[in-house]
Every structure is written in structure tokens, then in C-alpha cells.
């Protein structure tokens, strides 16, 4: 019996969530599981898998609440056979469990089998039919069904096969309900699906028999409990009743009655179901490290949370906080099966509360945006799709809420344009490969090729030479070349004994010193030569591991054959850089836990020759002080020049180590332990706590032999990916030194600007120049590769300097405007119109002069022009409120600037614009004539 995998998919970027029990076993079905991994040892498995279906291909989100059986989160009970038992045993065990253990009446059960498909050349699965008949199922209850109902496929390509489903008739009473099977009737529902994987769908669409047959069965716990407790709705079972009771206690709505459709007045019962379902999903996802966010699974979870919050506040009339208050009840229901949920209960509540508060704030902002947009719209027009899409995508505004709010105002959304935007967005996001399709046909072995290699006893590649390197006398790393034999060549999804010159292919060797991409570390590059042809190099572009075979991607410069003897040379500079950054990643992991606390867990990492990336749990933003402390802990470990100890040990023994760091992924057995400063045998000693005081991790990567070779580490970026998960990017060695030098140079420039800002500056151009310099420095600091703690410090200083510069410029502009205004007031002395030319360094100053004049002489309308050295003429005007609406400032400015071949705009009171100096004299005449005509 295996525990459930987390709902965050492991190693499958095509999936948002684990949405079926088989997800964690995909490497077995595809034949890519490492032969020494725990996964590859399984023959028979049972478990209960946490599943989420929301977003992506399997999306039940909008259906949840409308009926009594759709869910975003559900538990899938399953049993699997990997090349062990098949149809007879699977059907027999299922029938025994349902009819003898659970004592479900046989006459209420119906079974379906695949009825064949002539267009695919597939005959009916009579073997399965005969198994059911032999078990005593009446022929009238054994039903053939077409491909769409009874043929299961993993994706567009990959393992697939016929399935048999067991359906339950809720009504019973001796009737024959065969006609209702697979017809969408709520009375006759599927409870168990048994899939027999016996084919592989190829890229061309044809089916080939699988070398090994597998069984994959799935039975939804919620539906099973409904049957066993003699209920008609999943929500009436003890999986949901405690949660529904808790909702009733926390809101002002009447008690849940199980009503649907028109009978559910005010959608109160729907709201109960939505909230009960969604809070279960939130608890499960947050426990497994998926937090509400802005892309992928995180974005879907954000929508789930916001949908639940809406139904809480708008339908159930509940105060804020109801959703989080349900967490203890959910933990009580699910905690025994999934103890990790019990440990994370407080964190779940905090994240739900924070996101609820953010959404309620967004709702208010969204309502204001809708109000403003409606006011600006022309009568009898549709609400603009771009605004709706922005509300939906940026503020997380549910689409049905936008429709509802517009309906209240008698306006409809431009649905066609909105759907077009949604389609464009979907196309943009669908750029990756489809589920089940390998990314590269030369490096990812297909299931048939893998099976042929294994059945032909072609040995897995011995890649232990990748760890064969030493430290020379002068501290340099020495990598020995490796001699190997070409076992097979792989091209266009098939194995070859020979590949011609110019062809790209995967080379499978008996042994290699190349590191294949895995464990978050980039693959090696380098070259190979055929013995006897020293001058012909075969560049190795990438290296991948598949089912224990290491595939080297090369372009053959000459004919390459199975049996050729080759010598392998790793790109030593790239390998050493990866080793440095991988060891530094372990130092960083240790330092983060030391500074931020032992609850800080790794969420992912990626090591390249250029830099390292590390994702981890965090309760909030990492402060400047914490970043400095983390770097200091790493510096101390580098200075100590600790030995890096590595050894392979049995997986069961490794997992007993106290303080061991491991991520959620499948490890081979035996597994490699990397320990800094403490020999592995000491770490493994019973009751030893030394691993708590240093870095000890399960890791298959290549590492330095001493920490001193890291030389330096600088964290050059830190940001929150989503609430609760931060990502840091760091560089090492010379790059770290360069980052610190860049930081120091920028700090010196910021100090220089700060000093100049403190001096008394009376010139507007000089202050504007200083402000521009601050802006340029702000951009440089934001984009430079420099220590993140220093970036944050400088950004705080620059922000204050920018505010100070802006304030100083405004003050100087006001002073200059006052001087000019005083001269003009004395010149025109309370005249109803002032039209003149004045010197002004900017349109902002010219506008301030106009404002000053009108403030001091409220009955006066003013238009001023200011010729610039560039040949441009600036224009600003303000009309006395007494003259509006007959006299419009916007019309005045347009008339004047048109005379100067320019443009203008504004309001009836204030306007501005510009034009060319060639028409300035005519513009002054136009200004006066326009004003006289209006007064």
C-alpha cells in the first residue's frame, strides 16, 4: 500500500494538478522509471490518491455546486498491476470487494466492456466480457460500449487500452436499468473503472501492442461512500455533512437542504456545496505546496478561493473569515488519511484569510472600475471586452460576477470580443508539448524501444564514471576520459545499428562519464571520438536518462555504428561550473534553514553553469538583514573549506538520518548521500544528530570535493513566486565577485547623488537633471546583477531621493511661476483676459503661471504662450468659471494651437497644448479674437 502523491505533479509540467490515480505511475507505464528506483520495483499497488480537477483538460470547476456529484477535489481509490495480474484477476477482485466485502446487491450493479471499433481495427473485448459472465453477472447486466466510453488513453500518444466500468443503480427494486448506463442519468452512476493498458498510441495514430500489460483501476471514494451509506448525493455523506454543519453555524443562511436547480431559491444550497467542496480543495492544495497565485495551478487555486469567498459573502451572508474557520473541520474529516494536513492547519488558515482580504479589496476596486467605464460609455453600447478581460485576468474578477453587475445596469458584455481574447490567451499558454508527447524524439526512448532493449538484455548504462574526478596537487580538478562501446543508436523513435553522416541521433553506450540532466542539474556537454579516428569529433549537445539508459544527443559527422569503440571527453569548464553551483545550492539550502528556521523546505532548484535557482517555503518577504545573514553563513562554510563527503547507501537506511534534506521525488536504491564536513558513516550512526548541524542531502548531482572551491556566493535576486514560496537566484566564484563590484560601484554613484541633493540648488534644469540621474540609477539598480540585499537598500534610498527631487522641482517651479505671475498681474491689472508670451522652462511651469494668475484674479481668463529654443511653442490656458460654458478652455487652446500647426486638449476650465514658432504671431491674434467672440 502506497501513500497518496502530493497534488502538485512531480516532473510533469504539462499537468496543473494530479488529476488521476495513475499520474505518479506514469514512468512505469512509459517504461522510463530508473531500474534501481523504488517505483520500478512495484508489481502490485493499492492507494487512495488525492486528485484535483480544475483548469486544463479535466475541469469541473464551474459545474461544482450546480449538482450533487461534481467536485474539484476527490479521492481516487485504486489498485494497479505492473506486468503482473490482468483482466481475470482485476475483475474478480473488484467483484469480490463490492459484492462480498461491501455487500452491495448484485442486481444493482451493471458492467460495461469495450464493444470494438472497426475504424481502428479493434475487435470487441470478449475476453473481458467472458470474465464477467464467468463471475455470474447476468448477460443483461454485461453491456458493450463504444470507444468514447470504454477505451482509455493517457494522451494523444502513449499507453492506452480498453476498460470495463462498474455502474450502480440507486433505484433498484428489481428493475432493469441497462438502458440508463452511460446516459448521464443521476440514478445510474459509474463507481469503478478498470483500465487494461495493452496498447501504445503512436505519433502516427496507429496502435501497437505494449510489451507489458498493466492494470489501472479507479473508484471515487465520494461515490462509493454515497452507495455504502445509501444516499443519493455525495454531499449527504459523512465526508461533507460535518463541513456543511460548520458552514451553517458560521453564516446567516438557512440550513442545507440538498436542493438543486429552480427549487434552490437564491442558490443557497448551491453556495453550501461550492464552499464545502472548495475549502477541501484549498486545504489539500495548500498542504501540498500549491498556494493561490498568478499562473498555472496557483492561478486556478486563486479562482477556486475567490469563487468560495463570493458564495460565502454574497449568498450565505457570512462575515469575512468563514472559509478559514472551516479548516479544522476539514482536517478532522481528512486528517487521519492525510496527516500532513493536520501539521499544516494553521498555515492553511493564514493563507486563506490573507487571500480573502485581498480579494474583497479587489472586488471593491473592480466595482469602481465598472462604474467608471459605464459612465464613460456611449449609450446603447456593449461593455468593452478589454476592460472585462483585465478585471478577469488581473483582479481575478469571476466572469459570472461581471455579467451579473452589468445585468443590474442593463448593459451586456461584448461576449464575442471577450471570447476572442480568451482564445488568444489559451493559444499563448498552449505552446508546450501535449501530454504524453516526448519533447525530443532522439533522446526520450519510446516504450517499445525500451522494452526491446530490456528483453534483449542490453545492460543499463554504467554512469558511475561521472563521479570519477580528483583534486590535483595544485588544487585543480582532473577529469579522466572514459572509453565506451556504442550499444545502440536511436533516431525518430526507433533503434538503429547505424546512423549516417549529418544525422542527429541519440547514442546509447555501455558506460559514460557524462552527467545526464536530472535532479535539477543541467546535463554535461562535450564530445566523443571513435578510437582510431582521433581527428573526428562527435559533439555531445545534451545528455538524458531514460529507463536506466543514458542517451547522448549528437549529430554524426561520419557514420556511427553499434559496436564502435569511443572515447568520451566532458566539457570540463562547464562541468566544474555546475559542480560549483550544485555544492553552493546545498550550502544555500542549509543557510536558509539556519536563518529562516527549520520549517523552511525546498520547493525546487535548478543548477546551470551560469547560476543556481532555489525555491523555498517562506512566511513572508525575506528581509535585507536575513539575506545578509544567509550570505554570511555560506561565506563561513566556504572559508572553512569543508570536505564534501559522498557515498551510496540503501534508501531505507538513508531515510532514517535525522535532519536529512530531500525533495519529493523518486530516488534510486541505493541512493547517494552528500554530506558537508561530516563523513557519511558518521551521519548514518544510530541516533546521530550531526546532520542537524550541517548540510546532508540525498542527491545524484556532481559536487566539489571541498567547499573552498566555491570561493564566493552572491544572491542576486529574491522574489515571491506566490504567497508562501520565494525564489532566489545566486552566482558563485568570479561572477559573485563581479556582482559585488557592480553593487559597490552603484552604491558609490547613489552616495554621490545623495550628497549633491543635500546642496542648495536653485536652478530648475539642474534639479531636473539630478532627478533624471536618480531615475536612471533606479533602472540600473533594478536590472544589475548585484547582491539582492544591497539592491533593496539602494532602492529604498533612491525612492526617497526621487521623492525629494520631485518635491524640490515643484517648489522651484512654483517660485518661478509666482515671479512671472506678479509681473503679469502688474502689467494687466484685473483685465478680463490676459494673452501674452512668457519665458518658461516647461509646460508644467507655464501651467503653474496660469493657475497663479487665475487664483489671484478669479474673474480673469488667461492664455500664455512660451517659445522654446527648439522652435516649439508651449500653450497653457484657463477660463474663469464665470465664463463657462459659453467660453471653453479646451476650444480656446485647440483654436490657438491649430494656428501653430499643433495639437491641444483639456477641459472646459483648463487646457494645454503646443505648436510651431512659425505660427506664433497669428496664434496670438487668434487667441484674442476667440476670447472676444465668447465674452
Image (cartoon, rainbow, N blue to C red):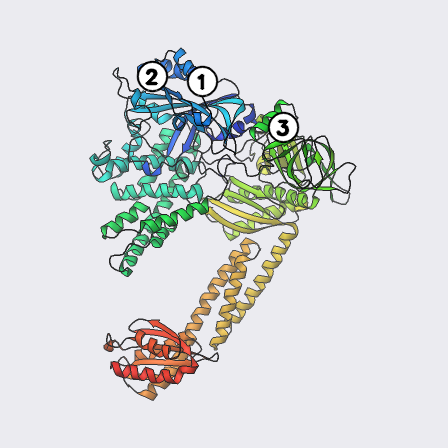
- How far apart marks 3 and 2 lie (CA) works out to 54 Å
Q: Earlier in the sequence, mark 3 or mark 1?
A: 1
Q: Is residue 913 above or below residue 161?
A: below
The residue carrying pointer 2 sits among few (fewer than 14), some (14 to 19) or many (20 or more) residues within 10 Å by Cα, namely: many
Q: Looking at the image, do the residues carrying marks 3 and 1 touch, with CB atoms under 8 Å apart?
A: no
CA neighbours of label 3 inside 10 A, class few (<14), some (14 to 19), many (20+): some
Q: Are marks 3 and 2 in contact (CB under 8 Å)?
A: no
Q: Please state the total of marks drawn on the protein image.
A: 3
Q: Nearer the viewer, residue 698 or 757?
A: 698
Between residue 693 and residue 507, name the one nearer to us.
507
Residue 223 falls left or right of residue 757:
left
Residue 563, given in percent of the width and then of the height, sits at 72, 30
Label 2 sits on residue: 141
Label 3 vs label 1, nearer the camera:
1
Which numbered disc covers residue 90? 1
Q: For residue 649, which numbered disc appears in the image?
A: 3
**Picture coordinates of residue 510 (x, y %)?**
69, 30
Q: CA distance from mark 1 to mark 2?
A: 18 Å
- Please name the residue shown 57% across and 38% down the image: 440
Please tell me which residue is depicted at 64% across the width and 23% down the height of the picture.
456
Amino acid at each position: 500500500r502506497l501513500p497518496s502523491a502530493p497534488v502538485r505533479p512531480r516532473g510533469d509540467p504539462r499537468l496543473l494538478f494530479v488529476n488521476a490515480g495513475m499520474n505518479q505511475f506514469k514512468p512505469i507505464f512509459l517504461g522510463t522509471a530508473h531500474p534501481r528506483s523504488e517505483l520500478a520495483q512495484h508489481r502490485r499497488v493499492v492507494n487512495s490518491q488525492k486528485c484535483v480537477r480544475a483548469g486544463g483538460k479535466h475541469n469541473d470547476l464551474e459545474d461544482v455546486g450546480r449538482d450533487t456529484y461534481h467536485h474539484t477535489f476527490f479521492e481516487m481509490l485504486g489498485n494497479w498491476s505492473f506486468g503482473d495480474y490482468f483482466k481475470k484477476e482485476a475483475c474478480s477482485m473488484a467483484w469480490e470487494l463490492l459484492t462480498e466485502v461491501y455487500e452491495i446487491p448484485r442486481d444493482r450493479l451493471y458492467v460495461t466492456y469495450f464493444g470494438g471499433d472497426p475504424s481502428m481495427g479493434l475487435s470487441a473485448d470478449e475476453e473481458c466480457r467472458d470474465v464477467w459472465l464467468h463471475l455470474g453477472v447476468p448477460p443483461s447486466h454485461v453491456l458493450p460500449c463504444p470507444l468514447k466510453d470504454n477505451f482509455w488513453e493517457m494522451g494523444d500518444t502513449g499507453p492506452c487500452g480498453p476498460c470495463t466500468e462498474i455502474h450502480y443503480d440507486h433505484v433498484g427494486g428489481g428493475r432493469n436499468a441497462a438502458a440508463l448506463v452511460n446516459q448521464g442519468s443521476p440514478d445510474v452512476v459509474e463507481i469503478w473503472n478498470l483500465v487494461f493498458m495493452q496498447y501504445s498510441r503512436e505519433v502516427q495514430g496507429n496502435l501497437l501492442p505494449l510489451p507489458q500489460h498493466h492494470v489501472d483501476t479507479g473508484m471515487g471514494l465520494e461515490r462509493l461512500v454515497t452507495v455504502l451509506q445509501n444516499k443519493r448525493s455525495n454531499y449527504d455523506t459523512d465526508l461533507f455533512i460535518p463541513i456543511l454543519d460548520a458552514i451553517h453555524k458560521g453564516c446567516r443562511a438557512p440550513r442545507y437542504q440538498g436542493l438543486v436547480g429552480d427549487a434552490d431559491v437564491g442558490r443557497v444550497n448551491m453556495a453550501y456545496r461550492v464552499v464545502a467542496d472548495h475549502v477541501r480543495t484549498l486545504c489539500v492544495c495548500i498542504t501540498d505546496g500549491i498556494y493561490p497565485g498568478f499562473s498555472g495551478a496557483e492561478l486556478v487555486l486563486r479562482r477556486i478561493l475567490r469563487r468560495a469567498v463570493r458564495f460565502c459573502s454574497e449568498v450565505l451572508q457570512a462575515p469575512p473569515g468563514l472559509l478559514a474557520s472551516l479548516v479544522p473541520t476539514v482536517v478532522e474529516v481528512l486528517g487521519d488519511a492525510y496527516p500532513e494536513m493536520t501539521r499544516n492547519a494553521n498555515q492553511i488558515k493564514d493563507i486563506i484569510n490573507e487571500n480573502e482580504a485581498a480579494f474583497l479589496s479587489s472586488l471593491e476596486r473592480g466595482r469602481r472600475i465598472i462604474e467608471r467605464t459605464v459612465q464613460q460609455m456611449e449609450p446603447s453600447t456593449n461593455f468593452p471586452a478589454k476592460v472585462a478581460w483585465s478585471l478577469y485576468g488581473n483582479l481575478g474578477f469571476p466572469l459570472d460576477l461581471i455579467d451579473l453587475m452589468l445585468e443590474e445596469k442593463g448593459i451586456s458584455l461584448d461576449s464575442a470580443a471577450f471570447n476572442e481574447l480568451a482564445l488568444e490567451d489559451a493559444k499563448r499558454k498552449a505552446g508546450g508539448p501535449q501530454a504524453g508527447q516526448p519533447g525530443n524524439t532522439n533522446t526520450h526512448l519510446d516504450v517499445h524501444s525500451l522494452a526491446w532493449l530490456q528483453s534483449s538484455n542490453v545492460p543499463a548504462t554504467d554512469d558511475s564514471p561521472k563521479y570519477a574526478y580528483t583534486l590535483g596537487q595544485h588544487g585543480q580538478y582532473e577529469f579522466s576520459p572514459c572509453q565506451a562501446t556504442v550499444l545502440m543508436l536511436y533516431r525518430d523513435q526507433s533503434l538503429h545499428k547505424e546512423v549516417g553522416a549529418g544525422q542527429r541521433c541519440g547514442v546509447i553506450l555501455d558506460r559514460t562519464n557524462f552527467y545526464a540532466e536530472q535532479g535539477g542539474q543541467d546535463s554535461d556537454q562535450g564530445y566523443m571520438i571513435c578510437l582510431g579516428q582521433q581527428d573526428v569529433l562527435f559533439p555531445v549537445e545534451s545528455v538524458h536518462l531514460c529507463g536506466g539508459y543514458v542517451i547522448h544527443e549528437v549529430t554524426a559527422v561520419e557514420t556511427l555504428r553499434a559496436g564502435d569503440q569511443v572515447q568520451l571527453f566532458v566539457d570540463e569548464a562547464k562541468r566544474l561550473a555546475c559542480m560549483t553551483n550544485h555544492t553552493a545550492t546545498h550550502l544555500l539550502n542549509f543557510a536558509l534553514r539556519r536563518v529562516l528556521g527549520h520549517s523552511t523546505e525546498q520547493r525546487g532548484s535548478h543548477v546551470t553553469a551560469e547560476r543556481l535557482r532555489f525555491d523555498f517555503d517562506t512566511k513572508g518577504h525575506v528581509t535585507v538583514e536575513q539575506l545578509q545573514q544567509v550570505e554570511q553563513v555560506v561565506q563561513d562554510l566556504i572559508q572553512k573549506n569543508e570536505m564534501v563527503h559522498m557515498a551510496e547507501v540503501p534508501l531505507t537506511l538513508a531515510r532514517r538520518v535525522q535532519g536529512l534534506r530531500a525533495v519529493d521525488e523518486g530516488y534510486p536504491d541505493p541512493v547517494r548521500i552528500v554530506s558537508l564536513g561530516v563523513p557519511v558513516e558518521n551521519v548514518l550512526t544510530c541516533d546521530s544528530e550531526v546532520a542537524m548541524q550541517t548540510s546532508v542531502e540525498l542527491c545524484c548531482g556532481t559536487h566539489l570535493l571541498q567547499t573552498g572551491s566555491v570561493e564566493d556566493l552572491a544572491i542576486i535576486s529574491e522574489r515571491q513566486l506566490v504567497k508562501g514560496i520565494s525564489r532566489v537566484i545566486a552566482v558563485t566564484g568570479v561572477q559573485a565577485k563581479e556582482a559585488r563590484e557592480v553593487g559597490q560601484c552603484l552604491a558609490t554613484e547613489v552616495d554621490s547623488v545623495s550628497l549633491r541633493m543635500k546642496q542648495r540648488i536653485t536652478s530648475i534644469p539642474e534639479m531636473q537633471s539630478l532627478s533624471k540621474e536618480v531615475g536612471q540609477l533606479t533602472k540600473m539598480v533594478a536590472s544589475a546583477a548585484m547582491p539582492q540585499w544591497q539592491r533593496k537598500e539602494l532602492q529604498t534610498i533612491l525612492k526617497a531621493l526621487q521623492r525629494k527631487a520631485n518635491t524640490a522641482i515643484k517648489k522651484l517651479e512654483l517660485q518661478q511661476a509666482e515671479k512671472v505671475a506678479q509681473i503679469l498681474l502688474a502689467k494687466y491689472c484685473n483685465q478680463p483676459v490676459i494673452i501674452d508670451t512668457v519665458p518658461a522652462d516647461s509646460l508644467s511651469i507655464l501651467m503653474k503661471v496660469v493657475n497663479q494668475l487665475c487664483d489671484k484674479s478669479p474673474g480673469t481668463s488667461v492664455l500664455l504662450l512660451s517659445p522654446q529654443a527648439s522652435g516649439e511653442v508651449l500653450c497653457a490656458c484657463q477660463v474663469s468659471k464665470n465664463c463657462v460654458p459659453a467660453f471653453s478652455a479646451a476650444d480656446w487652446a485647440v483654436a490657438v494651437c491649430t494656428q501653430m500647426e499643433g495639437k491641444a486638449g483639456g477641459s472646459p476650465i483648463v487646457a494645454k497644448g503646443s505648436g510651431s514658432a512659425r505660427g506664433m504671431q497669428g496664434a496670438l491674434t487668434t487667441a484674442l479674437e476667440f476670447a472676444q467672440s465668447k465674452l
